[in-house]
Image (cartoon, coloured by chain):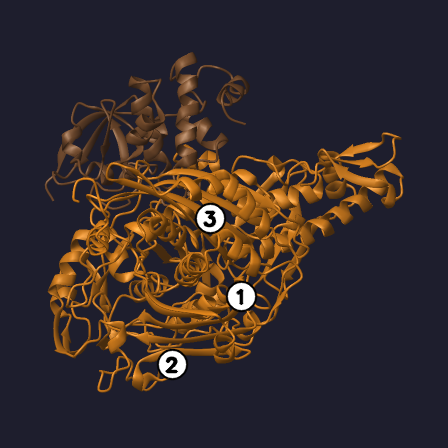
Amino acid sequence: MKTMQVCLNVNGESKEWSIAPGDLLLDVLRREGYFGVKRGCEAGECGSCTVLVNGKPINSCLMFAAQAEGREVLTIEGVEQGGKLDPLQEAFLEYGAVQCGYCTPGMILSAKALLVKHPDPTEAEVRDALAGNFCRCTGYLKPVEAVLAAARIYRQVGPSGARPRAKHRSALHGKKR
Amino acid sequence: MNANRSVVGKNLRKLDGFKLVTGRPAFTDDIHIPGLLYGKILPSPHAHARIKRIDTRKAKELRGVHAVLTYKDVPRVPHTTAGQSWPEPSPYDTYLLDSKMRFVGDRVAAVAAESRAIAEEALRLIEVEYEILPSILEIEQAMADGAPVIHDEPDSTGIHDAQTNLAGYILREIGNVEDGFRESDLVVEREFRTQRQQHCPLEPHITISWLDSDDRLVIRSSTQVPYHTRRQVAMILQISVQRVHVVKPRIGGGFGGKQEMLLEDICGALVLATRRPVKIEYTREEEFYMARSRHPQILNIKMGVKRDGTLMANKMTVLATTGAYGSHANTVQGNTGSKVLPLYRTPNMRFECHVVYTNTPVAGAFRGYGCPQGFFAQESVIDEIAQELGMDPVELRKKNMIRLGDIDDLSAQLGEGRKGLPRHVRSCGLPECLERGAAAIEWAVKRQTLPQTTGHLRRGVGVACSMQGSGIAGVDWASALLKLNEDGSFNLQVGAADLGTGADTVLGQIAAETLGVTLDKMIVCSGDTDFTPFDVGAYASSTTIISGGAVKKASEKVRDHLLRIASKMLDIPVDNLTCRDNQVVTKCECEKSVSMEDLAHYAMYKEKVQVMENASHWNTDSPPPFCAQFAEVEVDTETGQIRVVHLVTAVDLGVAINPMQAEGQSEGAVAQSLGYALTEEMVLDASGRVINPSFLDYKMLSAKDMPKLTTILVETEEPLGPYGAKSVSEIPINAPAPAVANAIYHAIGVRFRRLPIRPEDVLPALREKELPSPQRS
């Protein structure tokens, strides 16, 4: 198989990988150990393989790895900062939004793309942002609640998750429980 | 319910949550194995055919191909793929590879190659000549005179009557329904049809297998039934159970579709043939063709009532298809009778069911296990009777529903493929479910003010009830092993298979509560046949009550041992000690205590004893959870579009060990049932091929499609459950579909008796009814 080089940035680190021209970004990321990128349908329909490319959620099963040349890719592995969970990750745990967890990375990344741009979304806007991420376990209620709760933190402290966890937890419960 | 509890009943975070939200490698495929081969199965293009000639030479010669297997290369061992306790009540009608194809997607051959692309190329190089046989696609054709015989092989066993394609047959009667109809003032008889629904776990079936350094077959698999799989694979591959090690990592959802030994046998065969590690995973398309689905049924219901609403007779006659193989054929359909009819006290009940083979994709276990079909039919007819009698549908249900103290004999007659045990109702919150659910949807007001017409939109509300079981009485059993570590933490080893349900967390909570420690002291390992003790697996709503029962017993034994050691350390009689707040403390106020950590250290290095206990558990009964569900819908009379506005679930689950997780189970079940009601259907063409094997064409509900959900946990204290728990994983999937159908009737006065209820069904029905609409009249 003919190979080519691709240079990209993954989770803040520069990478140069040998790939085949037809390799999908999904397959290359998993091959390189980013197992949080999940294979669910390989047809751009389920959203399990969602990653952010230059901040925008895309189905990595629909993108050639070669197309990621020079771009910034964020996978779930890069969402945690300095050992601290992102407010979205905290909220997903706190609100019981994770069941089997297979769709969770994609859902968190879709939500992150929304909140970074728009930290004060309505419930309808959250549902819109998650519409490309199928979940067969939760019925979506708890994931939506979790995103709305995380949005409160994003508005207070930004997406970096810089505050201590205890404060986060109380802030998460601004509305519910 | 009990304020003194510090772990049970709390909304604690999932124990495995951290690794899931951070995307740590945790699932079957999240592993790199050197030398891994890619396995692929050649599916039959024909619904019914015999292989006349199969030539694998070209495929074998392809560079990178390590094995090509056909029926000529493997042992022929009749078995069932259903992951059930031995002896499985499903017919042994399936073979690892066979010369006869019985549905589009049946296994022709299997290859193992160095890459997926090579494996796919190898499949194309296998030359097969088929003798195409006449096929049966329609359920009613299966038993017709002269119908082709799907299982004409001589070596299958357990088929009710192979010559008439009858996989299973059930007939049970209590009292005499004909007498009951004669004593009735009103008799309603209706026919219902339900479709093929697919589980659609986000993680498709996947198995990775290899030979370890002791030449044992390791099977890392996305399964709900590690122990049954070990037994079945050993039998099929004709190796000893001792040589098989099944490992269940995190599972990306199963919903019954993984209560099935589906890929493990063929993957293991490829490993034995190549002596290399092999992975087989279904693509999403293959998941629709080659995995399992909910049994389609045609149900005839005839119910008789007195003028005052007293039910006199309930007769359900079912024709179901199991597809090409009889996985779960008898037991799913048995459940349609045993869990549905007894919801209402009726002196005369009759359940008859024919389960037939057709040349269609194989049905199997699916959350609800026969109940969603049965409750759709029964709860629709109950609604119709209420309408005929001029009674409120809630009141009619209250009048007839099963009550605390009742003993139901139908369930005894319809056991798990054999005579079962009578069901005693020792806890029942159904009246409260109906009351609180009705209040949440504003039933009294809306039944009066609706149907409301806003232009072309019409709204209505509907109700439906259901029950389920908690484990299979006298069959399901589980064990747990609990070990103390020197820092006061515990290893909880359970055969139970957390498939994303939160079982590890719930079982950890039961252990932590019993031991007086916090949940973070629990290291839970589940579903590994080498390192955890036996459990039947995750199905039949059994894990919390059966596996949880074993965990509680093992924890009590460990606690007793801890107290004996603490008694020595503190010089205080055991009777005066208790476990609390990660320590052993005196019950009275003399304030002596020893931390669990110090106690553990003492036990290990002074006493030189490993505190470790094992316990097993089973129940003689299957305590039913109960549920009342209410739907508010809006029907667009111009487009036929049905929008569910609000869905209320009030569920009696016993005590909720983790209420947040219990709500999540319920909400997910409701989403699957709303799909069942309105959008989800595997459609076959005239050749038996699934024409919509993708998420684009098979419509599950997304975050945008879901209505407002209200979940009410109605807690009761179940004497047979650990800390009073029953179950919650299946029951809320039963009644949303009939609640929606009943709400549609309330809105537009049309009854739909076929699922899913699609806009293209609604519009003609409205036209037929000549509903005056502002635009059209």
According to the picture, the residue beneath numbered tag 3 turns out to be B629
A32 over B292 or under it: above or below: above
Circle 3 chain: B
Q: In this view, does B274 lie to the left or right of A143?
A: left
Residue that label 1 marks? B342
Same-chain status of marks 2 and 1: yes
Q: Which amino acid type corresponds to the residue marked 2 in the rendered image?
A: Ile
| Residue A68 image position (x, y, % from top left) | 17, 29
Q: Residue B159 carries which label?
A: 2
Q: Which chain carries label 2?
A: B
Q: Mark 1 lies on which chain?
A: B
Label 3 or label 2, whichever lies nearer to me, is 3
Alpha-carbon span between mark 1 and mark 3: 18 Å
Residue B138 figure quarter: bottom left
**What residue is drawn where x is 21% and y is 43%?**
B773
Q: Do the residues labelled 1 and 3 touch (CB within 8 Å)?
A: no
Which mark is first along the chain, 3 or 1? 1
Quadrant into which the N terminus of chain B falls: top right
- What is the distance, in whole Å, between disc 2 and disc 1 at their CAs? 28 Å
